[in-house]
Image (cartoon, rainbow, N blue to C red):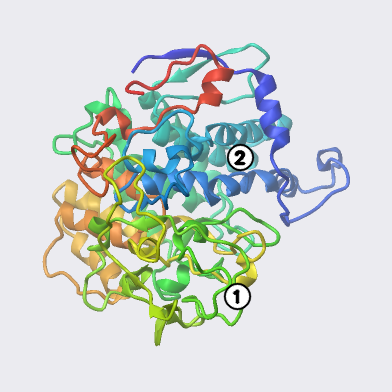
Amino acid sequence: MKLNKVFLAAGMFAVALTSCTDLDVTPSSQYTEDPSKNSGVDPMIMVEAKMADLYFHLSGTFGRRYMEAQCLASDEFTSLAFDGGYYDGGTYAHQALHCSSATDASLDWYSDVTAGITKANTILEELGSSASVQMTAPARAIRAYFTWILMDSFGDTPILEKVPAEGEVVARSPRKEVAEWIESELTEIIPYLTEDVTENTYGKPTKWMSQALLAKLYINWPVYTAESVDQYDAATAANPKLDACIELCDDIINSGKFNLGSVDYLHKFSYDNGSQIEDFIYAMPYDAINRQGMQWGRPRSFKQLKGMLPTYYGFADKFTQSFGGNMVVTPEFAKLFSLDGDIRNLSILRGDVFIRDPKTLRPTSEPFMYKDKQVHFTEDITLIKQDNTIDVGNDDNAIQQGCHSIKWFINPADYNNGRNQSNDVPIFRYADILLMKAEALTRIGKTGAKDLFNQIRKYAGAPEIAAEPTLDEIYQERGREFFDENWRRNDMIRFGHFEDEFFPHYKNFPDADFDKRHRIFPIEQEMLDLNPGWEQNPGY
C-alpha cells in the first residue's frame, strides 16, 4: 500500500497526553518527588510508579467506542434505531453495514491510542538510553500492543519510537512493516518481562501477555502482510508463522499458570470478576468508582429497565440510570448458541425471558414481566422500513426485537453510578491460546487440535467432538467462546467471512457494503485534519 508522509505535530501529542483523565490507580509505590533522583530507590519500583497511568490509558476507549467498532462491524451485533432514537447520525448502523465514515463517533479513538503510544515514549525518554531492557520492556510491550490496535483496525500506521519533534515528518508505514516491527519489539523484550502472575501483575504487561500478542500477530500474519487489505484471500493464504505460533502457545500452556475452569464461564465476565480468573492472561480492570469507563451494559440491556423491579438481573435494587437496548445479537449469530448443555447458551437472552439469580447468574423459573406480559426477545428482527436507519419503531414490540447479550452481568450498585460497571474486560485468555494452537495445527495438517478443542467443549458442558476439527468448526467455536469480546471482526477477516451476509449486511440492503477494502476502518477525521499530508484509506 502507498506510504503516506505526514506531519504529526508534537503539540497535538502534548494536548492528547495532558487531556487524558488521570485514573485512580494504586501503583506499587508512591512518591512525592521524582524517584529517579533518589539513588536508594529500587529502579524497577521507579519504573512501576511512572508506568501506572500508562497501563490503564485505554480503559475509556475499551469501555465504549472501541467495543462499538469491533462488535458492530462483525456478525455478532447490529444496532437498532427506535423511531430515530439511537440512530445517532448513523454511527452504529455504518459499522453494521460496513459503510463507515471518517466522522463516525464509534471511530473517534485513533487519537486516544496514539496518545497512549506517546505516553509510553515519554516514559522511555525519561528513563534514558542507559536504561536496561528489563526496565524499558513494560513500556515497550504496551507501545507494541497499542500499535497493533491501530494496525489491526486501520492498516498502515506510524511506527513511533519517540515523541515527534515540532514539525517532524513521520511516515505512515505499510502494514507489513508495522507487523514486522511489532514482531521485532516483542521478540526482543519477551525474555525481560516478568513471568509472575499475581494480583500485582494483573492488568499489566507480562511475558505471557506479550507472547499472547505475538501469537495473535502470527495467526493473522497473512492478513497483516498482504500487499493490500483487499488482496488477502483466506482460501489461498500461506502462513509461514504457524510453527512459531504453536511454540508460543505451548510456552503459555506449559507454564502451568493459567487454566479454563477456576470459575464457570458465566462468572468470568460478571460484575465481580478480576485477578482470580485464571483464564485471563491480560485484562483491562474496571471499577465503577475508582476506574470508570466500562459501560457495555447500557446498549445491551432491555430499553425499559430503568425503575423496574424486579429486573432480569435479579437484584433487589432498582436501576436509576437509563438503558439504550439498541445493540442486539444478529439472527445468524444467535443460532450458534444451540449446543446441548452448553453454558455459553446463557450468554444471550432469547425467547421468553426469566429473572436471573445474581449469585449463580443462571435463570430462575420466575418470568421477567413488562406491562403484565413476559418479555420475549425475538431472534428475527422486523424493520418498519427497509433503509439504512435499521429502525424497528418504538412500541412494546419494537423494544423486544433481537436477542440481547447478558454476558457482562450488571450490578445496580455499580450501574447507578453514571452507568459504570466493575466487570473487567479480558483481552487475552488462555482459552484463546488453546484455540489458536488448534487452528495453527489444523492449518498445517497436524493432529492434536481435537484435544485442545475438547478442553473448551468439556468445561463449557458442550458435546465433545470425535474427530479432528475442521477450520469451519474452529471458526464457529471461536464465535461461541469469544462472543462479545471484540475478537469476531478479527476472526471473520482471517477465516474469509467478513464479506458474508448477515443482518442487516445483506446484498441489495440500502448502504450495505461488500468492498474488501472495508476490512479496515477509515482514519478518523480529526487525524486527517491534524495531519494534512495523510490520505484516507482507499475505498473511503
Three-letter amino acid code at the position of disc 2 = Ala
Residue 322 position in % (x across, y down)? 57, 61
Residue at image x 15%, y 57%? 447
Which is more toward the observer, 66 or 123?
66
- Asked which secondary structure carries label 2, the reply is helix
**Is 123 situated left or right of 41 in this image?**
left
Tag of residue 463:
none
Is residue 451 toward the left or the right of residue 488 in the image? left
Q: Nearer the viewer, residue 473 or 213?
A: 473
Dividing the picture into quadrants, the one containing residue 517 is: top left
The residue beneath circle 1 is 318
Q: Can residue 129 be seen in this snapshot? A: no
- Disc 1 + disc 2, Cβ < 8 Å: no
Callout 1: SS: loop
Query: How far across and how far down the image is residue 454, in percent?
Result: 24, 69
Quadrant that contains the C terminus: top left
Q: Is residue 418 left or right of residue 105?
A: right
Amino acid at the residue labelled 1: Lys
Residue at the location (66% across, 56% down)? 291
Is the N terminus in the top left, top right, bottom left or bottom right quadrant?
top left
Say the numbered circle drawn on residue 139: 2
Q: Earlier in the sequence, mark 1 or mark 2?
A: 2
Residue drawn 67% across the image and 63% down it: 417
